Each structure stands twice: as structure tokens, then as C-alpha cells.
Amino acid sequence: MGYPVFYSDQMAKELMRTDHVVRHQINELFGEEAYYGDRVNTKHISTLAFKDSVLLGKMNQIIHPAVRRSFDDWCEKQKKKIVFNEAAILFETGAYLKFDASLLVTAPIEVRISRAMSRDSSSREEVTQRMSKQWPDEEKIPLATYVLNNDYTTPVVKQLEDFLLTLD
């Protein structure tokens, strides 16, 4: 719809690949198997991190501040009055508190699982394991400024237009 969008998960992956400090810290945390050449071994990292909450927490302490700095730099370059920050765990990290408004996109669990499996070529088990580290929608809904339902029953674009009207 013409608004700039910062994709936190994509930036996290990019920083893991290109930021020398982040890369070094990830290597220290997950071992040499964390990378093959210039590529991040996401299978290795996610297998370990999503089975060990302490390890996941340490990884998040490396990644989240780097992503937040990148977002701040990105915002300074934007010309639009409204920008969006797409992030899977915006509420869980408390980052939503730093924004003027938050938009939570919800969908039934089975729809979310199916979409993630298709998008990432992940197994159902991998997707549900990642989802288990996220808050359920019921915990996030009271914190969101606006909730968009993405379950094929109401046109998403119409809901988004309604949300944008509340921002002007």
C-alpha cells in the first residue's frame, strides 16, 4: 500500500550473515557448525535454540539489539510519516511499547502452521516447536492497538485500510 516496511526476521538473518560481531557471537554460542562458508546453518541453530530456552535467550540477546539498531537507522532514512515494523515476536520482547500503534495479524493455528510449512519448507514439528516459543494470540490481543483477522473470512486489505484510517 506504499508504506515502508522493515522486516525484522529478514534483517536478523541478514545480520547473522553479514555483521561480523553478530556472526562471531553466534559462532561462539553454537559452534563452528553455525555457518558453512558465508551461509548460516539455520537448521543447526534452530534445532539447538528451540530445544534449549537458555540458548534461545542468549541468541535473542545477540540478535534483538542488532535488529533494533538496524531498524532505528532504517527509520531515519524514511520519508513517509508512517512506517511499519513486521516482527514475529514484537509483543514477547516488549518492543511493541516503543511504537505509536501496533497491528496484530491473527489466523487460526492450523492456517499458520500450513503457511509456515509452505514458506520455510519446514516440518510440522519444526513449525509447532517455533510457535511454542511465541505467545498465543489471546495474550497478544489485549496489547495490540488493532487486530487484523487473516483467516480468509474478511478481506485483509479492507481491514488494513480501516486500521490506516485510525492512524491519520
Image: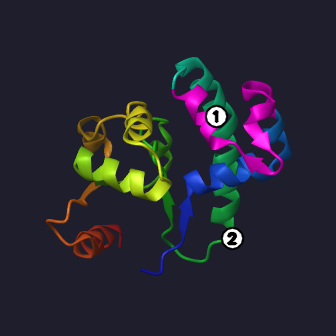
Location of residue 116 with respect to 34 vertically, above or below: below
How crowded pointer 1 is (Cα within 10 Å; few <14, some 14-19, many 20+) is rated as many
Residue 148 located left or right of residue 71: left
Residue 151 located left or right of residue 124: left
Residue 134 drawn in magenta? no
Residue 90 located left or right of residue 73: left
- Residue 86 in percent (x, y) is at 48, 57
- Residue 58 in percent (x, y) is at 65, 25
Instruction: Tell me the quarter of the image containing the N terminus.
Output: bottom left
Disc nearer the start of the sequence (2/1): 1
Front position in the image: 143 or 140:
140
Q: What stretch is highlighted in magenta?
A: 25-50
Furthest-left residue in this view: 153
The answer to which quarter of the image holds residue 47 is: top right
Q: Which residue is drawn at 41% across and 41% down?
A: 127
Q: Is residue 145 visible?
A: no
Q: Which residue is drawn at 26% across and 53% down?
A: 111
State the scheme by which the image is colored: rainbow
Furthest-bottom residue in this view: 2
Secondary-structure class at tag 2: loop
Q: Which amino acid does label 2 sit on?
A: Lys
Residue 45's disc is: 1
Front position in the image: 2 or 154:
154
Mark 2 or 1: in front is 1
Location of residue 47 with respect to 64 vertically, above or below: above
Secondary-structure class at tag 1: helix
Q: Residue at x 63, y 63 (%)?
A: 75
Residue 77's disc is: 2
- Residue 106 in percent (x, y) is at 27, 52
